[in-house]
Image (tube, rainbow, N blue to C red):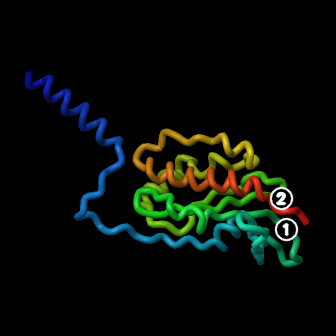
Amino acid sequence: MFKKFLIVLVLFSSALHGQERVRDPKDKKPVFHEVSNQDVVKSIYPEAVKVEKVNDYWYRVLDTENKPLGYAMSSVPYCLNIKGYNNHTPVMILTDKKWIIKKVALLSNWETLSYIRKLEKKGFFNLWVGKTLSEAKSVKPDGYTGATMTVVAVTKNVDFLLKKGGKALPVKN
């Protein structure tokens, strides 16, 4: 009887181990991780010198001659009601001039850095890269144990931008 109890206990504990932890009030407070919008843009377009607002959702990324390099959109301030594990999970989507996604980046946030790094290592933020805006709408991430709330929140931010931004594409110069 004790052996059966021990097996059940081990199985139950293994199942719980894969679940997102519930924050204990004694845990440390979340830490704010500042992400520079400029650094995100420059990671894809190092020659960018200016970003100009085009409409409610889109920004044009420009070089020294004011020629467009690509486009960007941010979920700030639209998705402040979408929360991850600790708080807001704003994202920026960068595209080229043909609306192919070059990068999806988490902006300044309160999420647990170790979980964000795990998501980056597993390629979560790259799921949308290389897809057109309409192709990216069909991306449905799953299987990111341990950071489920963050994954769901980031995905909701991306989905919002794809839906709203896809309907408000800037006129190309």
Local packing at callout 2 (Cα closer than 10 Å; few below 14, some 14-19, many 20+) is some
Residue at which label 1 appears = 68
- Circles 1 and 2 in contact, beta carbons < 8 Å: yes
- Report the label total: 2
Three-letter code for the amino acid on which mark 2 is drawn = Lys
Residue 137 location, x and y as percent? 67, 44
* Quadrant in the rendering for residue 43: bottom right
Q: Return the residue nearer the eye: 42 or 67.
A: 67
Provide the secondary structure element on which disc 1 rests: strand
Position of residue 124 in the picture relative to residue 21 (left or right): right
* Residue at the image point whose x is 60% and y is 67% from the top: 76
- Location of the N terminus (image quadrant): top left
Q: Secondary structure at mark 2?
A: loop
Asked whether, in this view, residue 136 is left or right of residue 9, the answer is right
Q: Is residue 124 above or below residue 14?
A: below
Q: Judge from the rendering whether residue 167 lies leftward or rightward of residue 9; answer left or right.
A: right
- The picture places residue 83, in percent across and down from the top left corner, at 47, 59
Residue located 40% across and 70% down the image = 31
Q: Position of residue 73 (x, y in %)?
A: 69, 63
66 in relation to 9, above or below: below
Which mark is on residue 1? none
Mark with earlier residue (1, 2): 1
Residue pointed to by mark 2: 97
Q: Is 104 situated above or below 18?
A: below
